[in-house]
Image (cartoon, rainbow, N blue to C red):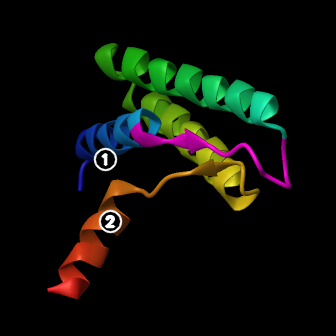
Amino acid sequence: MSIKVLVAKYVASTEQVLRELAVLEDSTGISPEDAKNVVEYARAYLDDAKYYKDKGKLAVSLTSVAYCEGLLDALRLLGAVKFEWPTKAIAKKGRRS
């Protein structure tokens, strides 16, 4: 898979997560306000990824979207947000059939 395809896949996946993500009010790991702040940092990294993709700097774009995903995964592991990566949701649906 080319870096261009990877960037497009990760950007689309992360955009979907950010649309559907829910900040949990009763998290034990981080306050909802702090979680929302970190989500905004993740959004900024996604914006950077799109900017660098448009400029043809695909390695920087991929790095930026990876940082975004890392922040989101950390929040999820702390129990501060709830979401599922699209590829995992598709895999679960396939197992139910």
Which residue is denoted by mark 2 in the rendering? 89
Q: Nearer the viewer, residue 79 or 60?
A: 79
Q: Which residue is drawn at the image coordinates 23% and 74% (left, top)? A: 93
Which residue is denoted by mark 1 in the rendering? 6
The question of residue 82 being in magenta is answered with no
Q: Which amino acid does label 2 sit on?
A: Ala
Q: Which residue is drawn at the image coordinates 32% and 65% (left, top)? A: 89
Tell me the chief SS of the magenta region.
loop
Q: Where is residue 16 in the image (x, y as percent from the top left)?
A: 35, 39
Q: Nearer the viewer, residue 91 or 80?
A: 80
**Quadrant of image for the C terminus:** bottom left
| Numbered range of the magenta stretch | 20-30
Q: Considering only vertical position in the picture, is 16 above or below 60?
A: below
Residue 5: image quadrant is top left
Q: Which of 1 and 46 is in front in this view?
A: 46
The question of residue 26 being in magenta is answered with yes
**Quadrant of image for the N terminus:** bottom left
The Cα atoms of the two marked residues, 2 and 1, are separated by 19 Å
**Residue 19 — which label?**
none
Q: Which residue is drawn at the image coordinates 30% and 38% (left, top)? A: 12
